[in-house]
Image: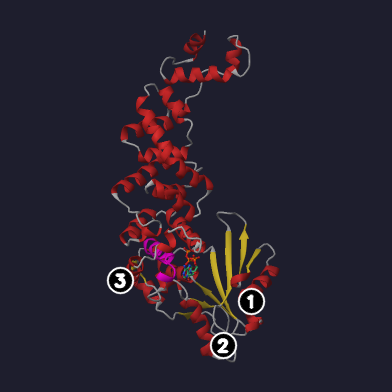
Amino acid sequence: IASQEAEKRGWHLYLVGGAVRDLLLAKTAGSLMIKDIDLVVDGFHKSADVGAGVELAKALQQLYPAARLEIHGAFQTAALLWHKDPELDSLWVDIATARTEFYPYPAANPEVEASSIRQDLYRRDFTINAIALRLTSPRSGELLDFFGGLLDLQAKQIRVLYANSFIEDPTRIYRGVRFAVRFGFEIEPQTEEFIRYAINSGVYDRTSQENTKTPALQTRLKTELKHILEAPYWKSALQLLDNLGALQCIHPTLKLDGSLLRQLRLLERCLRRFDAEQTLIHWQMRLEALIAHLAPEYRVKVAKNLQLQEDSILRLKNLVQSFSQVIECLPTLQRPSQIVQLLRQYDLPILILIALQSPRSLRHQIWEYLTVWANVQPLLNGNDLKKLGYKPGPLYRQILDDVVAATLDGVIKDRTEAEEFLA
Ligand code: ATP
């Protein structure tokens, strides 16, 4: 339907980016699930058609009223969203106008036509993401592969399009790593050299320093980190980023050393054990663990640069103080009820961050608190207290807390003992 609408207007329409790559990969690998479709309209260089993508999106929205239309004016792009189920049954179609200069050539000149989509593809990150599939006739179904993307797909190579690419946009380093690990591809040697060159020339200054001039870059870095840290392959991706020196884009001192690796392993155990329902945002906890590994004075700045949520920033800010409170007090406490009293002022995510950095003996106490002690319920309830002759009121909370404390400390084991205890 989209290609018919484009043809009616005398435009070409192409499927580009990840969908083409995944279609071609699925030919060899099998299954395919595309939820994100990138279309590029080529308006044949008529300046009047600069908004071709937006116009096409509007026309399609008329035909599919269930889709939501979003227009991003500054870039002449539009998106159509089908949103039946936020997780499973959704489809996102981006429609852009081929980004190119407007040549004063006649529309039907095939060389100019090819150069327009070629330029659009040349702006992309890797050869495997720079293949277009023509959807409009004539020659619909034709693949436009100007940069050898098909060969690289076959050879399992992540190859950048031009030398300066990573200097222009350092987040492409993260994208390259993500695709390499996700598909089991290799970063092609020259591409790796370009990455190392970009890092050695200090490209991370633009992503890691407090710099209000580059908020868009930092947003993209956060998006890439999210993609990486929520994927099953996040650990291998971090290893590869570290090998390339690319963790410096988060902060120049960040290294995936043995201690950080151990903390990340512990974090996974915590998340499996204490957050099976996934009430915490796991990729964000992984990112917080990375940031918490930095010296305290850098943490908040990095969290703000990456535009983390307020609660994350606050947690990283308070971590030093909370950590030292726990580290100082915990060894002085003997009874479980005292430990509960100390630890219950912290919520799960900060306790996890504290535990990651704590010595083993203290970590075990935090573990015990999270797995057992925090869940101990009073052996009696309000009705029982009434029967025992206590007048209902605010004192009930205190009495029940005392019952819990006595249970925790092994003073009482069952209801009878609890009643005797209160009597
Ligand atoms: P995924 O399956 O992970 O979504 P994708 O390739 O579809 O992969 P998107 O982030 O949706 O990834 O990007 C769509 C396309 O836009 C890419 O295939 C690529 O051609 C281009 N692109 C995205 N980000 C960049 C970038 N930073 N630099 C250059 N091109 C990019």
Q: Position of residue 394 (x, y in %)?
A: 61, 19
Q: Are marks 3 and 2 in contact (CB under 8 Å)?
A: no
Please tell me which residue lies in front, 372 or 210.
210
Give the magenta-colored segment's residue range.
Answer: 167-181
Q: In this view of the protein, which residue sits in the foreground, 228 or 2?
A: 228
Closer to the chain start, of discs 3 and 2, is 2
Q: Which residue lies furthest to the left in this view?
A: 258
- Taking the magenta stretch, the answer to whether it contains residue 244 is no
User: What residue is disc 1 on?
Assistant: 51
Crowd tier of the residue under label 1, counting other residues whose Cα lies within 10 Å: few below 14, some 14–19, many 20 or above: some
Asked if 235 appears above or below 317 in the picture, the reply is below
- Determine the main secondary structure of the stretch shown in magenta: helix
Amino acid type, residue under disc 3 in the picture:
Pro
Judging by the rendered image, the residue that carries numbered circle 2 is 103
Question: Which structural element holds mark 1?
Answer: loop
Residue type for callout 1: Gly
Question: In the rendered image, is residue 367 in sight?
Answer: no
Numbered disc 2: secondary structure: loop
Residue 170 highlighted magenta (yes or no): yes
Q: Can residue 189 be seen in this view?
A: yes
Q: How far apart are marks 3 and 2 (CA)?
A: 37 Å
Q: Position of residue 202 (x, y in %)?
A: 36, 65
- Residue at which label 3 appears: 189
Mark 3 surroundings within 10 Å by alpha-carbon count, few (fewer than 14), some (14 through 19), many (20 or more): few
